[in-house]
Every structure is written in structure tokens, then in C-alpha cells.
Image (cartoon, rainbow, N blue to C red):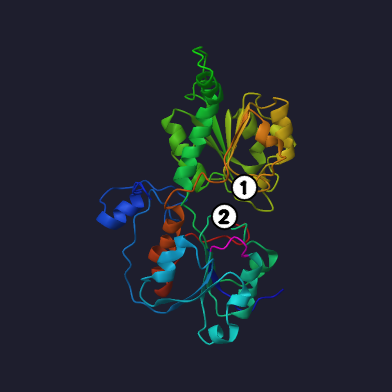
Amino acid sequence: MRLSSAAALFVSASRRPRLTSYQSQRLFGSSSTASPSPETMGRYFNREESLPTKHEGPVVKEARILALCDADDEYNRPLYEGPLPENARLLKIGSSLAEFDVDEISEQHPNVIFVSHPKSRVPLVELLIKFPSVEWVHTRSAGIDFIASEELFQAPLKQLTNAKGMFSSTLAEYCMLAISYFAKDLPRLMRQKNDVNWEQYPVSEIRGSTLGVVGYGDIGRASAKLAKAYGMRVIGLKRNAEGFSDPYCDDVYGMDRLHDLMAESDYILVSAPLTDQTRGMISAEALSHCKRSAVVINVGRGPIIDEEALVDALQNNRIRGAGLDVMTVEPLPKDSPLWKLENVLLSPHNMDMTLSFMKESTQFFIDENLPRFVRGQELLNPVDLKAGY
């Protein structure tokens, strides 16, 4: 399927949540000097390290936005209700092509699509075909697997951006939770409390152990930062490892050294995006290189791990355990053996679901990238269509 000249996509309490550094800087300003990573300098945003931009320069065009979203999505209220930046306006909200009046909208020449609806793969391509004036698509999530398709990747898009850097810190906290869960044997601790059993037992020390990060991007770096505070050694696996260095990463391996990373690591964090290249990369063979004491932690996407091979390794104690926030099929089927394995920590893909996480992501689109777009400036968080992230 050939798409015309489609150009760009932007996909997309009772207790007051603690302000992130980004929120605080937006409200009060900051004179602090962050230490951005090579990944976040310039082109990429990071919720904990990036300073809000003071947008300057002439406004040279209008942003006419289509929202491929649920109209009742409360996290998108800033987009739906405004105010929006100068020269930006929302044309229509809908979750399928049928909800967009093609003739009426075509006359307004939409040039931006914001995507947050989870079932957007087909509607997005349909909108690009119907509205060839679109220049930019933005996803509210960091992963783009829910919109990825051959048709999208072959489209002559000018720009596709995502919400990279918005969810890293809380997933890093989960990584350390999972490490501590196994190092201190929290299941035994809870059993003994339930049994009113005062029985001392030895625990593992986290300091001095090795964290291997499969997919050393924004989430991986945030996890490495916390791991170093615990005194861990960190190995990162990257597609483009040559010449890469980072203060939180002791060693960087290319993709051809996955098995070396698996063999050397006490804890293995999977934080890679889901692409054709990463699907099933944590295979039975890869798992066979693990120490028997190793723990696998997945915050990336479920299909990156061969789940059947992982279950087999866990059932036969070939690895110590697994901490899984993502599964191959979600919700996890009730007959999955993962539910009953005592050496598995499960969470329902919610370890980045803070009270404000999605609203902040929508606000990033409004506050950071929309002002850049109307000024003809480079957008933050560009997605490499060839790589798929």
C-alpha cells in the first residue's frame, strides 16, 4: 500500500503526587545543572533531567491536529480542552476512520496526528491515506509496537515521534524492587510473618552483583543509575555499541554479545523495544547461558522473551526467578503457569502507571513539541522508522 505525501504523526487523587523535576522546573524554574546522557542530549527528552524549553523564534505555520484517541480519555484533557500553544488547534477526536468526516476535515488540511488509542494500527494508516497533508505523527506512549506496520514504515512520513523519557524513572524503581524481592527473599519473609514464625535466614547482597541491561536506552539508563547507587556493576547491550560510553554503564556490548551478557549477569533487565529484531531474542538458547542464580526482569514487551522457554527454565530451576511486568499475551491468561510459579513476581503491566504519568505525556506533546512544530524547529524524540523505535 502506497501512502501519498503523508508526513508526520504524534501518537500518540486523594494524595497529591510528588512533583517530578520536570514539573518543578516548569512551575518554579531551576538553576540546577543536569547530567544528560548521550541519548537525551539535544534530540531526546528525559522527564528527570531535561529542562523545560523557553520557546523562541517566529511562528511560521499552523498545527491542525487530529486526535486518534478515546474522547473520554481523561489524560488527554489538556489537549481536548486547552489552552494549546499559539497557532495550534484541535480539529477532531476519534478512534476510527468512521468518526472523522473526511470531506469536511480535508478542507482544513490536517498536518498532525496525536495517537493514544490502543487499537490505532489500522485507523492510523487509513487516516494517512485520507489526509496526505499530515506531516507529523506523535504517540503518547514510548513504545510504537501498537501502531507499527509495514504500511506505516513505508509511508513517506516527515516525522514520527514518541514519549520516550516519560516513564523511565518509575520502571527503574520497579527494577530495583524486583532485584530486592529476590535478593532478600521477600516471599519467605511474608510467609514467616503470616505464620508468626521468627526464623532468621541468610540473604543475598546486591552490592557487587551485576545487572545486565538488554536494550540500554532511556529505561535501561535510569535503572543503571539506581543500580550504581546500590554498588552494582552494569553491562549494557546496544544495537549501536561502538563508541558509546555512559557514566552509569561499566561495559557496553553489541547485540552479538547477548550470550556473554546473560552469562555474566546476576540480574538481567529486558528493556528493549519490541521490533522484528528483538522479538524472541531472549530465547531458550539465550536463557541456557544464564547462571542458575540469575533473575530475569522484563519491563520492555512480553514477546521479547520466549515465554515457553522462560517457564521451562523457571520450572526446572535453571534460573532463580523472574520479575515480569509485561507478558506475551495481556491480560495474562488464567491458565498460564506463570500464575502459580513461586519464583515469579508478576505485575499487570502497571509499573509505570503513576497518578500523573499519561497526563504528563500528553502535556509533553503540548508544551515541548507543538511549539517546536509551529516554529519549524526540530522535534524531540524522533523515531527511527527503519529500526522501529
* Circle 1 SS class: loop
Q: Is residue 117 magenta?
A: yes
Q: Residue at x 44, y 32 (%)?
A: 228
**Marker disc for residue 140:** none
Residue 274, x across and y down, in percent: 63, 51
- The structure residue drawn at horizontal position 64% and vertical position 77%, both measured from the top left corner, is 129
Q: Position of residue 289 (x, y in %)?
A: 69, 30
Q: Tell me which amino acid carries mark 1.
A: Arg
Viewport quadrant of the N terminus: bottom right
Most extreme residue toward the top, as rendered? 199
| Residue contact at pointers 1 and 2, CB within 8 angstroms | yes
- Is 3 left, or right, of 367 in this rendering? right
Residue 229 left/right relative to 258: left
Tell me the kind of residue under disc 2.
Gly
Q: Which residue is mark 2?
A: 143
Instruction: Residue under label 1, please give it.
Output: 301
Q: Residue at x 55, y 80 (%)?
A: 133
Q: Nearer the viewer, residue 347 or 14?
A: 14
Q: Residues within 10 Å of mark 2 (few under 14, many from 20)?
A: many
Depth check: give the residue in front, 133 or 316: 316
Vertical position of residue 152 compared to residue 166: above or below: below
Q: Quadrant of residue 307?
A: top right
Task: Tell me the distance, in whole angstroms, between the alpha carbons under discs 1 and 2.
Answer: 9 Å
Residue span colored magenta: 116-120
Work out whether residue 275 can be spotted.
yes
The answer to whether residue 304 is above or below residue 322 is below
